[in-house]
Amino acid sequence: MMTVNKSSANSDSSLAIQPPVISTDEQTIEVLKIEDVSVAVGGLVTTLDGNRVNILCEVSGFPDHQITWERDGVQLQRGGKRYTIESAVQNDSGNYTCKASNIAGEANATSRLNVLGKHTRRLAYRDQGLLYAILGWVTSGKATFRERLHKTVCMNQIV
């Protein structure tokens, strides 16, 4: 770690130079309804097309850092702790990386974004006290389905 001494007539202080550190959130998030999505960088995000997606990159370190956003290795934006997709479409699916750098070093963090097509359907059913959701969507003309455990049902009440 390097130290910078800063002197003035009234005080003497030291500031430690630190490489950038990115705060990440490694959650898996599924937003399968029409609403804006805002997440910290890191983890997996699945949403419907047409939704606004904000990926946030909170960075600490000294001195100030430069942030660059990339999608699948291609630079999208220089600067800004937020990358926004106004109306996501399936072609926006990919790996979004926030890269932060300063004279002390660099850091990066990546989120995986999956955007489901317009033909998304949701069907719920109960079996042996559990509520399941079958998610279906059309990708490249092929219908695909995924079954997920959704919520536990207790005495015919969803919990």
Image: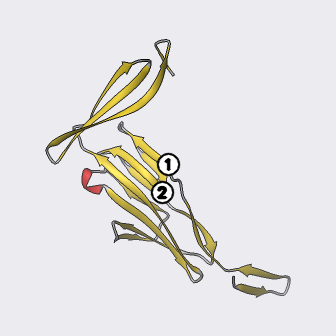
Give the residue furthest to the front.
128
Q: In this view, does 154 lie above or below 76?
A: above
Give the left or right position of residue 29, taking residue 15 as reference: left
What residue sits 71% from the left and 79% below the top? 16
Identify which residue, 4 or 152, lies in the foreground.
152
Q: Is residue 104 above or below residue 80?
A: below
How far from the left and from the top, in percent, is residue 69?
41, 68
Pointer 1 with pointer 2, Cβ within 8 A: yes
Residue receiving disc 1: 27
Q: Tag 2, which secondary structure?
A: loop
- Crowd band around label 2 with a 10 angstrom C-alpha radius: few (<14), some (14–19), many (20+): many
Q: Distance between the residues labelled 1 and 2?
A: 7 Å
Q: Tell me where residue 29 sits by quadrant.
A: top left
Q: Tell me where residue 36 sits by quadrant.
A: top left
Identify which residue, 39 or 107, lies in the foreground.
107
- Specify the label residue 17 is tagged with: none
- Crowd band around label 1 with a 10 angstrom C-alpha radius: few (<14), some (14–19), many (20+): some
For the N terminus, which image quadrant?
A: bottom right
How far from the left and from the top, in percent, is residue 30?
41, 42
Give the residue furthest to the top.
155
Q: Is residue 103 above or below residue 92?
A: below
Q: Tag 1, which secondary structure?
A: loop
Give the left or right position of residue 47, taking residue 106 as reference: left
> What is the three-letter code of the residue carrying label 1?
Gln
Residue receiving disc 2: 42
> What is the three-letter code of the residue carrying label 2?
Gly
What residue sits 25% from the left and 55% below the top? 91
How far from the left and from the top, in percent, is residue 20?
58, 72
Q: Which of marks 1 and 2 is nearer the N terminus?
A: 1
What residue sits 47% from the left and 66% below the top? 80
Total marks drawn? Answer: 2
